[in-house]
Structure formats: structure tokens, C-alpha cells
Amino acid sequence: MIVVPHGVDRSPSLQRVPCRVASAGDGTPPLELELIAAKPASGGGERTPLLFLHGAFAGAWVWAEHFLPFFAAAGYPAYALSLRGHAGSDGIDQLVRYGVDDFVADVGAALSVIGAPTVLVGHSMGGLIAQRCLGALDLSGLVLLASVPPEGLFTINIRLALSSPHLWTEMALAAVLHPNFADPQTMRRAMLSDTIPLQRLQDYFARMQNEATCATLEAQFPCVWRSAASLRVPTLVVGASRDRLIPRDAVVRTAWFHGSELREIADMAHAMMLEPHWQEAADLLLDWLGRKAF
């Protein structure tokens, strides 16, 4: 059974799709991954599937409330993956040692299950994973929402530590220990708008979790090897004007690196798929998909 946050519109309905990935090669059984799907109501004329990747501290649930039903209603088979050790996927006991390549393997397993050319949509840390898939997996398109830039987070973190030391400290506590060790109001200002209803805010933060230490360390430094333009993968890069974690200049550099279209959404915070006006981001993506004939 799929459990989604408070207030979810369950039409189209969500379902869990069986998905397995090989473990680290140490003889342990394959890992069961949580892959949630929302399928279009009509059986014919389906468009290119979409696979959504979550950011740090989260899981597939961040896409379940709004984006999966929205895109399924628009005719796109929409999938969201919980990377190993996250949400409903196996591997939480080994989360500390997982790196970016482990998560790329998870994406490969999900794409094999989908079994069709797919547009990969990554948010924040999920955007880094999506970029790392370039050249390693066959992608039809790529969308990066408030994504970690190709050069990593090191310079961004230095700037944040100097300009907003309290916010940097709280984010460091969340990354090293657990989001519960951080100040909830600071985390809210980092990721979401002040207008989000209190009940939903409580639901979201109750579901946040530890993050993979190895992957978090890798994300500090350059670890994107291929440009989408060099592979002729159509790409959209989207930033949020009120994002305190991924500044606009980092979004611009990401778009430049991939030779992609760049869009910015006004009055939007970092976790745009959970924002009260989330549909602005969804509509922007839907427009791009239509113009690219996916």
C-alpha cells in the first residue's frame, strides 16, 4: 500500500511497481526499491514516461502529492523512485556508505522496469544523480529542478556559511545527524515558503530522514562528467527565486554546462514540488515537454 502525505488527491491512483537492484556485490540479496507510478486514465496514446528523483532527506513521497497525479492526468506515465535507503526502499541500515554510483544503479533498475525511453526529472541532490546518469544510461530528456550544480556544493556552502551561518549550521546538523536535530523553523525557511499550511509542514518534516554520508561528501565536489548537449539530450534547468540553498548563479552555470534552456520561477522556494503554488513548476515542465514533443 502506498502511504502519501496529508491532503493528497488520489486520482489518478498511485500504485507501487516491483523494482529490484543488485546489492553492492557482496553476495547479499537484491534490494527492493520503492517505485511509485501514476498511469494515465486512457490506455492508448500515452506520452513519454517521466521518472522523478527526490533530493536529500526525502523519498518518492515528495512527488506523490501533486506531480505524479498532475502528469498522469496530462497523459504522461509518471514514476517516482525512492533511492536505496530512503523512504520505502531497502537499505536504510547501509545508508551511510552509499555513494552517487549506487544511486545511479537504482535509476538504471527503475528505467529497466519502465521499459521505454524516459525523461529523467531530478530535484536538488536528485538532480546531481540525474546528471551523473548522462552517458551511463539511455535518457530521452533531462529536467533539473533546483539542482546541485555540476561543480558541486563546496563553494555554495562556503558562501552560505559566511552569509547565513545559522542556516548553514542547521543544514550541516541535518546532513550529519538527522533533520530532527535542526531547528524546524530554519529548515522551513531553507526549503519552503512561509505560506505553507502548518499541518502539511508537520507531515513533510515528520517524513524526513538521514542522508547518505558518502553521497553527501561526493556532492561537495565536481562529479558530473558529461554535458547533456554533448550527448544531444534535450534539457531544461529550472531555478527558484526564493531558493536559499541553490543560488541563481549556480543554476545559470548548470544551464550553461548542459547547453540547456533556463527558467526561473518567481516567489518559489527550494522544494518546489511541495510549495503552495507547485503547479507553476509543473506547468512550466509540461509546456517544455509539449514543445519538445515528448
Image: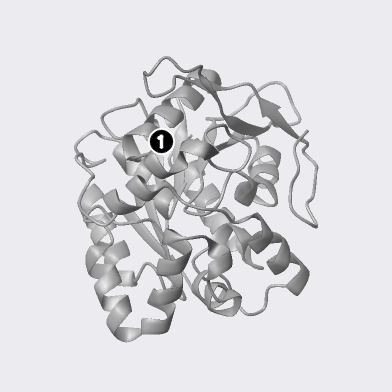
Q: Quadrant for residue 80, please give it.
A: top right
The scheme the figure's colours follow is one colour
Seen in the image, is 237 located left or right of residue 37?
Answer: left
Q: Is residue 21 above or below residue 97?
A: above
Q: Amino acid at mark 1?
A: Phe
Seen in the image, is 89 located left or right of residue 117?
Answer: right
Q: Quadrant for residue 261, please give it.
A: bottom left
Residue at position x 47%, y 60% in the image: 177
Seen in the image, is 108 located left or right of residue 185?
Answer: left
- The image shows residue 249 at horizontal and vertical percentages of 27, 70
Quick one: label 1, few (<14), some, or many (20+) residues within 10 Å? many
**Residue behind mark 1:** 103
Which residue is nearer to you in this view: 48 or 15?
Answer: 15
Residue at position x 74%, y 53% in the image: 5
Quadrant of the snapshot with the N terminus: top right
Q: Is residue 78 above or below residue 21?
A: below
Residue at position x 36%, y 83% in the image: 165
Residue at position x 50%, y 18% in the image: 30
Seen in the image, is 77 located left or right of residue 233?
Answer: right
